[in-house]
Image (cartoon, rainbow, N blue to C red):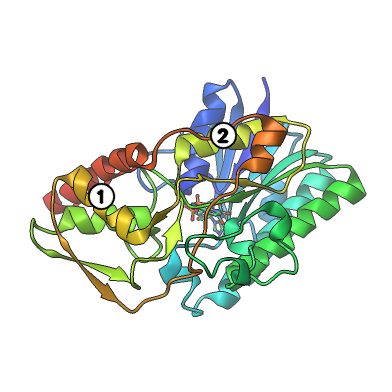
Amino acid sequence: MKKAVVCGAGGFIGSHLVKRLQREGYWVRGADLKFPEFSPTTANDFVKGDLRDPIICREVFDQPFDQVYQLAADMGGAGYVFTGLNDADIMHNSALINLNVLESCHRRNISRIFYSSSACMYPEHNQLDPLNPNCAEDSAYPASPDSEYGWEKLFSERLYLAFGRNYGMQVRVARFHNIFGPEGTWTGGKEKAPAAMCRKVAETAEGGELEMWGDGQQTRSFLYIEECLEAVRLLTDSDWTGPVNIGSEEMVTINQLAEMAMKIAGKKLSIRHIPGPLGVRGRNSDNRLYRQQLGWAPSQPLVDGLAKTYTWIEGQIRAQRRT
Ligand code: NAD
């Protein structure tokens, strides 16, 4: 039986990835500071510990594994990443995790390792026009991310690629663009735009007012979790290193995202634009390289994934009100 480790298995993407790997027949060890928030972990084994600690890392990698997925990071939505208040923690914590995980894998002669980078590493100057952002993989340099989160991702991408070159490790690097879906953080300050919009719409009565950071003209694309996992698995099993975008090319404004959530809910709310942390003006995934190398592209429309996410968040709100 093939064995895999998922670091960050208590998080949104990691907990879904554990299930996906198990469906494919893998024995999976999860590792995280915490267990998944919204349903029990299905991992065959789970190390609850801090990957900043090299001793914990050695415990996690105490035997050979066929594949490792490194998703653990100190991260959150715009309210966490773009205020500047968490910069030192974000850089220090995530860099330490990546240094330790790579060192432990190298020590154990574990070769195939997937690393989740982020579209936040792309230069800000290519993302000023909301209608024409450039996020082609080869636009990464000269580097100028708009957040320390993005700089750490860029550093760690290079770290993985260096281990790949110098130690013959089969590293795979993907740059995620806004992954969303059920069982993602939906409240508390670390939630991303799709979950935040669904929550606000679900919590607001018909005819009420929805608060939105900025003018809502900023653009983004959002990829549903199942399609993200398909892309991650294809890339990891392939013989191609990356770095490559994993995202959707269906770009919308945040105003359109809010309208979509309202339509799903069957509610009409007015939008009140307020100042808040925003990130770049425009961003869209560019999937040409992925398509060319791996012959696959996501196909689900945003509204389908958003409807599933809305239903799940509405259920969470109802459950919270009952307690
Ligand atoms: P998440 O926050 O839900 O999961 C990250 C997990 O890492 C959390 O469960 C957290 O407890 C764990 N973690 C943090 N510090 C740790 C430590 N010191 N030791 C052990 N575990 C630790 O985030 P996610 O949305 O599942 O994202 C997974 C990865 O994908 C992250 O690396 C993130 O930067 C990257 N990414 C995600 C998105 C997205 O839209 N979700 C976009 C770009 C990149």
* Quarter of the figure with residue 297: top right
Query: How far across and down, in percent of the image, does residue 174 sit?
Result: 65, 47
At label 2, the amino acid type is Ala
Residue 175 higher or lower than 121, as above or below: above
Check whether the beta carbons of the residues at disc 2 and disc 1 lie within 8 A of each other: no
Q: Secondary structure at mark 2?
A: loop
Labels in figure, total: 2
Query: How far across and down, in percent of the image, does residue 45 sit?
Result: 56, 35
Choose between 226 and 267: the one closer to the eye. Answer: 267
Residue lying at 66% horizontally and 69% vertically, measured from the top left: 151
* Quarter of the figure with residue 99: bottom right
Residue lying at 54% horizontally and 26% vertically, measured from the top left: 22
- Quadrant occupied by the N terminus: top right
Marks 2/1: CA distance? 24 Å
Which numbered marker is on residue 225? none
Q: Which residue is mark 1?
A: 261
Which numbered marker is on residue 297? 2
